[in-house]
Image (cartoon, rainbow, N blue to C red):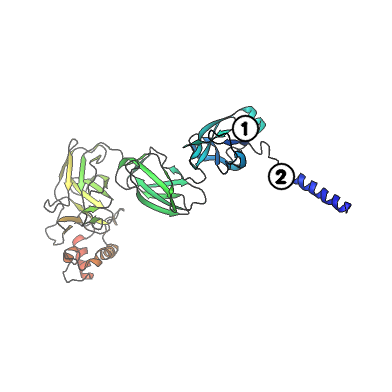
Amino acid sequence: MKKGLLILIGLAMLGGVALATLQTPATYPAAFWIKGQLSQDGSGNPADITNYKIIFYKNSGDAASAYAYALSVEGGYFKINALEDVRMEQPPFTAGNYFIGVVKKDGYGVDQTVVTLNPEDITNGYKVVPLTLAANQGIPDPTTAIQITSPIGGENWLLATIQNISWEAPASITSFNIDLSVDGGTTYTNIGSVNNAKTYPWYVSPPMSTNCRIRVSNALDPATATVSNLFNIGIPPRRGGPTLEVTALLDGYYDETTQLQRFAVLDIELRAADRTTIVTSEPFYMVYNNNTRAIDGIGENIPEGNYYLVIKHINHLPIISNQMVAFSLTETATIDISNPTNNFEYQPADTSFPAMALRSGVKIMRGGNYRYSDPPNAEVINGDDWQQWYKAFGANRTSANWNEIVDGDGDGNITGTDWQLWYKNFGYSSFVPVP
């Protein structure tokens, strides 16, 4: 009996040694400890302060980029291994200013507080930091926060470009909503959602603003969200040259009910007196009210004077003005090709197929595939366009202006005869001469 008791006592002692070994904190450089006691506001009694999240971090005002944390235990005690928990720095851990705070819980927390690590602290491998809770204080919880990494603020994202919105988030968040504000954050509009990704390629669309913010939120918990700094949605820098403002309505883009159309990019050409020599070609950014900006820059060093104006869109038939348009360096040329009374577009005398469709009292650029490529394939209207034409208008057979839209021979059906008329009238380049 005594022998058995001695064995049990010996095992217990060995177990105690093993337990003590496991509980012995690692020493620097394997660890650097931030430890202390969290006290209650004015009470001096920390006994019940548990599960407050204490955050030790590297960058002022940015607890999420490099941090370590621990929860307070009974008595308010906490101990954070800055190296093990976050890898804020590989050894040697350097002296300097760091920061600590407590995430608000039940209305109490601790605002950002500077922690100065001296060389002797580094040598000792720890720093004691006492903290006291205060009402209405606390820092954001980086363990559940979303941090936007693009835009960071101050960017000028150009219309019709693709910009990557990116962010960091805890692994527990996998579904995100991406919203845009153009009024500084007063109102937001959703522009996309993603799952299992932390980037969103966004096709930059109007309206233009110098007061934009991106908001990324947890799709399952919208309260978990973060907002970017201000950035701009703009247009390319204005350049020297004649100025122009255009109103153009595009088939399939223009909504006859709201009388608005979605964003599009046109290609504007100025042509010489022979109607084929391109003097300059510039992109035009159509905004939500159907107008472009007044572009200051129809080509570098383009003199004022008279030019034929060509208006193109990648999946619409191009048109050319029926006469030369006067351009000035001091006044803006205002062109409204949607006006049914101005007869802006060139219309050959020997064709009955209009260059533009007349619908709901306005003229609209017809669908068709304009191709940006080198001759001899440039501006070719072929079977691909016929398929697109059929797809776009096939559902409109009950339309009151059906014959005007697509049924070239007026028999009430879309057939090869209509395509033959289409091809005959529009040929290789609509009514716009091929350069």
Residue at image coords 22%, 54%:
258
Q: Which is more toward the observer, 422 or 13?
A: 13
Does dot 2 land on a helix, a strand or a loop? helix
Q: Which residue is mark 1?
A: 127
Q: Which x, y percent locates residue 396?
A: 22, 66
Q: Which is more toward the observer, 202 or 350?
A: 202
Mark 2 crowd level (few <14, some 14–19, many ≥20, 10 Å Cα): few
**For the residues marked 2 and 1, what is the alpha-carbon distance in whole angstroms?**
22 Å
Does dot 1 land on a helix, a strand or a loop? strand
Mark 2 or mark 1: whose residue is earlier in sequence: 2
Vertical arrangement, residue 390 with respect to residue 245, above or below:
below
Quadrant of res 131: top right
Q: Which x, y percent locates residue 24?
A: 71, 41
Left or right: 141, with 23 as reference point: left
Q: Which residue is mark 2?
A: 22
Q: Are marks 2 and 1 in contact (CB under 8 Å)?
A: no
Q: Which x, y percent locates residue 67?
A: 55, 40
The amino acid at mark 1 is Lys
